[in-house]
Amino acid sequence: LKLAFGNYQASAGCIRLRAVDGSMVDITQASPREIVQLRASAVGYVSQFLRVIPRVAAIDVVAEPLLERGPDGKPHMDPEAARAEAARWLARLRIPASLWQLPPATFSGGEQQRINIARSFIRTRPLLLLDEPTASLDPQNTDTVIELIRAARDQGVGIVGIFHDPAVAAAVASRSVAMQALNP
């Protein structure tokens, strides 16, 4: 995941990603500026841990990707529409409305994970990187996230994920690699 996200430099090979403008970019050869642009436009990332600005309401954390400026310099949505879409995602992921105006740093691990998922899924991007997206979730929310991943996959989103739960991996993967088999 860290190679595909551009955090680590590859020692060999290439990682090609189709940018939003249709061009193919080799992440292993991309400049830091190009990697930042790809992350903003073409790569969604669900990490195990939510890292956000303190004291920002959960609904605004989720809406933020819709307020980012696109290639035309305009936000993807106006603020009111972005907050309404964020509310739909929060409700779908069973975050109580009473929490929407609170900063997610005060939430449980499972609630933070669902904020992270909503934030990453709210805007469709060509590539979605998932680092244990269901690790902190109860069975009902795990099922919801499995549905979201399948829907993204069915829409043509490329998905690379790490799943320690074999049942979740089997439910979402069209192809899988057991990484422990690669270690000597």
Image (cartoon, rainbow, N blue to C red):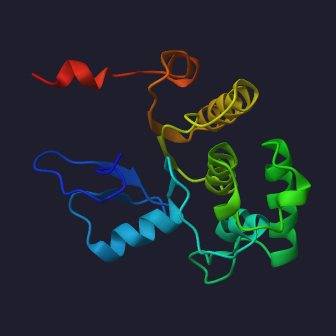
Residue 176 drawn above or below residue 83: above
Q: Residue at x 56, y 24 (%)?
A: 172
Q: Residue at x 64, y 63 (%)?
A: 105
Q: Residue at x 34, y 77 (%)?
A: 33
Q: Quadrant of residue 79?
A: bottom right
Quadrant the C terminus occupies: top left
Residue 113 on image: x %, y %: 62, 47
Residue 120 on image: x %, y %: 61, 54
Out of 78 and 20, give the one closest to the viewer: 78
Q: Quadrant of residue 147?
A: top right
Out of 60 and 154, give the one closest to the viewer: 60
Residue 130 drawn above or below residue 143: below
Quadrant the N terminus occupies: top left
Side of 122 relative to 101 (left or right): left
Residue furthest bottom in the image? 73
Q: Residue at x 35, y 67 (%)?
A: 35
Out of 105 and 33, give the one closest to the viewer: 105
Residue 100 drawn above or below residue 57: above
Residue 31 on image: x %, y %: 26, 72
Side of 95 relative to 147 (left or right): right
Out of 48 and 39, give the one closest to the viewer: 48
Residue 89 on image: x %, y %: 79, 51
Residue 168 drawn above or below residue 11: above
